[in-house]
Amino acid sequence: MIAIDKQPQKDISALAVWLVCLALYVVFMYFAFTSPNVLKGELGLLENTQVVFLVIALPLAVWMAVRNKEKWLRWWLILISVGLFYLLTEETSWGQHYFGWDMGGFFAGFNDQGENNFHNTDAWLDQKPRAVLLLGMILGTIVHPLVKRFRNGRGLFDNPWWFAPTLACLGPVVFSQIGALPKRIDAFNLAFSAQAFTGGYRSSEMEEVYMYVFFVAYLLSLHYRLKLHKTAASAPT
């Protein structure tokens, strides 16, 4: 019998990521058409799903930052960890939504919505960071691979090699925009409301769910590729 040298998989399963995204979307759409109130509110399914993926992503990013010794990689992971911590505390209003704390002290002076967070005070702390993140997701998972394909392997973010997301992260990008479609359609001021048809859920909230799924997919992909890189570097020549 001839032994077959099976090559290791180069990345996490893109199919698995797509299936997770699809499963989430099916669940969300089921409730959008049957019990839309389940999706809404600070303790609704959309907000809680956001928190779940942030709770997964944050310790993963911190763990990777501690384990990896390469200078710029570690700083990149620290930056991601800080960003995830900010997102988690903002989404939960520092636990206010779960523990029922009153707004007070530092936030009372400038938050007019009664919540312990920054993103309800200024668009620069809410819409702008979301737009930057979405732009990075699109550039990394759509534009970068296309540029590499048509420029003989030279992409937008080739150095360092680990920086750019891979096609395994494409699913969350696509579904973030599918989830935001009702709001995009209503922007054309047509004769009907797509948001009303889909139960009136906030498109931005579903978009954010998939943005946070993206973080998990990116970190898992990065961890897997780093592991392969270290294995290849230590292999005898």
Image: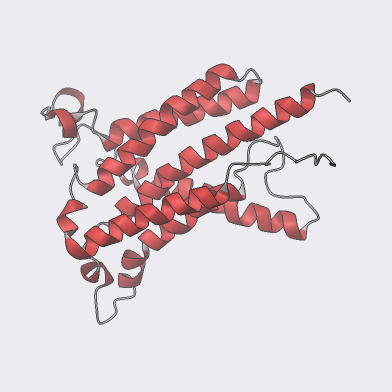
Query: Residue 182: percent from the left, percent from the top?
Result: 32, 67
Q: Is residue 86 left or right of residue 158?
A: left
> Residue 186: percent from the left, percent from the top?
30, 71
Tell me if residue 109 can be seen.
Answer: no
Residue at the right extreme of this rendering: 237
> Looking at the image, is 108 positioned above or below residue 121?
above
177 versus 87 height, above or below: below
User: Hey, which quadrant is residue 176 in on the image?
Assistant: bottom left
| Quadrant of the image containing the C terminus | top right
- Residue at 70 percent of width and 56 percent of height: 147
User: 144 or 68: which is nearer to us?
Assistant: 68
Instruction: Pick the residue in front: 75 or 66.
Output: 66
**Residue drawn at 54 percent across, 22 percent down:** 65
* Residue 72 position by quadrant: top right
Examine the rendered structure and indicate whether residue 66 appears above or below residue 31: above
Tell me where residue 188 appears, x and y as whole percent.
Answer: 34, 75
In the figure, residue 97 lies in which quadrant?
A: top left
Can you see residue 207? Answer: yes
Count up the numbered dots. 0
Q: Is residue 131 left or right of residue 47?
A: right
Q: Position of residue 82 (x, y in %)?
A: 43, 27
Camera-side residue of 5 and 234? 5
Which is more toward the observer, 21 or 91?
21
For the point 50% across and 48% down, the residue is 17
